[in-house]
Image (cartoon, rainbow, N blue to C red):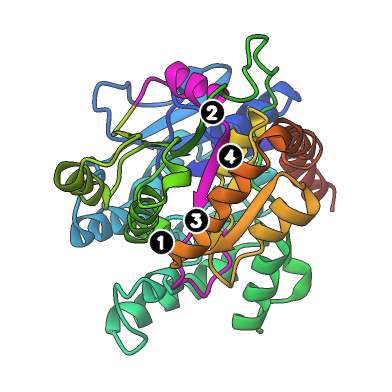
Amino acid sequence: MRILFLFQIFDFNKSTIYLDLVRECRDRGHAVSLIAGTSDMSLPTGVIDVEGIRTVYMKLPDQFGAGTVKKALIQMSIPGRIKSILKDGFNKETFDIIAYPTPPITLAPVLKYCGKHYKSAIRYLMLKDIFPQNAVDLKMFSYSSPIYKYYRRLEKQLYEYSDRIGCMSEANIEYLKTHNPELPNKKIEYFPNTAAVHELSATNDSASSDGLSIVFGGNMGRPQDIDGLIASVRACRKCPDLNDVSFYFIGDGSESRKIEDFIKNENPANFIYKHQMPRDEYEQLVNNADAGLISLSADFTIPNFPSRMLPYMQKAKPMLAVVDEATDIDICITEEARCGYAVNSGDPEAFISGIRWLRSNKDRLPELGMNGRRYFERYFNAGVSVDILERAYRG
């Protein structure tokens, strides 16, 4: 296949589900090209070869820490930039698959262009964020807002111009069908978050000898309900039987200041926070932890399925999932993979019960972690995603 990927943000030096997907496509012998957004202005322009992948970097202002208006303006500029790159670098090319994730949802003009210029190409949407509904859930704006109506129109255009829409879970599929009944069922299918499978470390310590160590890594933003997590950790600190539980929060985001204030004002015992950590150090931290933590805001009405679970599964670590009512990730963790425990978000007492469950089942945690690892190898390895793209191509 000849595959073109369009990414708002992409970095060959950072391990992500998209990097693993691109590499897996390449390793199977497919001709892979990509247009990759970057804020690194030192990278070369024009079509270059990176790891055997034809790449064009789309230079964008740094969006980290940018305000809502600046981010919106950057994302609105992306379609024009991509169309310009396509015309300059890929005008005479042909593609079988053009694949792109959300965010952003502003790609409709690009897809319309691709439908006319690359007539035989299947435009494949890898649906990750359901926007603008997630912003409404988090009270960033309301249904009556002109902003919502504008973005909802873009969202519908994105779906219209996509030939296939790949959803992260069955709950995602049902949500999309319910709220977009005009979409034909044959356009919507399952497309999970996946990652490359790496060997388990030979020095992997399945559990710490004393206490309980829990890692929460990734974005620290409103979707993760940082306020709720802080309240829950605060409640844990008041329980004498949980004094030996350690929390490691690693990552940055719009809510990271709240974590800093929590540490500054309350100096919680056994709580470590770092904005960033070298990849090898983070992997070692997860490797030596007893469990990983997932958190979703109780306000969500959309069924999120966080990809941060994959590194935990990769390292054979069980999980405590703090989840909303819309997601089905709890079913995956507790019933299908059988690799953890789930509690309702926004409820510190429920969080405490989850920590106590991990504590009381510490001897079983390595077994639960291996359950997750085996499930990951079978259902969430990057090859699964490539299989789906190949089936789409074969029709």
Which residue position is annotated with label 3?
352
Q: Could you give the CA–CA distance between mark 3 and mark 4, rounded to whole angstroms? A: 46 Å
Which quadrant of the view contains residue 3?
top right
Q: In this rendering, which labeled residue sits more in front, label 4 or label 1?
A: 1
Kindly identify the amino acid type of the residue bearing the numbered disc 1. Answer: Thr
Q: Could you give the CA–CA distance between mark 3 and mark 2, rounded to whole angstroms? A: 18 Å
Q: Position of residue 287 (x, y in %)?
A: 57, 23
Numbered marks: total: 4
Q: Could you give the CA–CA distance between mark 1 and mark 3, rounded to whole angstroms? A: 41 Å
State left or right for residue 138 relative to residue 290: left
Q: Which mark is residue 289?
A: 2
Q: Is residue 79 visible?
A: yes
Which quadrant of the view contains residue 218?
top left
Q: Secondary structure at mark 3?
A: helix
State left or right for residue 42 relative to residue 48: left
Q: In this rendering, which labeled residue sits more in front, label 3 or label 4?
A: 3
State left or right for residue 226 relative to residue 359: left
Q: Which residues are magenta?
A: 277-304
Q: Position of residue 323 (x, y in %)?
A: 54, 62
Q: Could you give the CA–CA distance between mark 2 and mark 4, rounded to whole angstroms? A: 38 Å
Q: Secondary structure at mark 4?
A: strand
Kindly identify the amino acid type of the residue bearing the numbered disc 2. Answer: Ala
Q: Residue at 45% of width from left, 26% of height from top?
A: 14
Q: Could you give the CA–CA distance between mark 4 and mark 1, rounded to whole angstroms? A: 18 Å
Q: Decide which of 258, 230 is in the foreground and name it.
A: 230
Kindly identify the amino acid type of the residue bearing the numbered disc 4. Answer: Leu
* In magenta stretch: residue 278: yes
Q: In this rendering, which labeled residue sits more in front, label 2 or label 1?
A: 2
Which residue position is annotated with label 4?
4
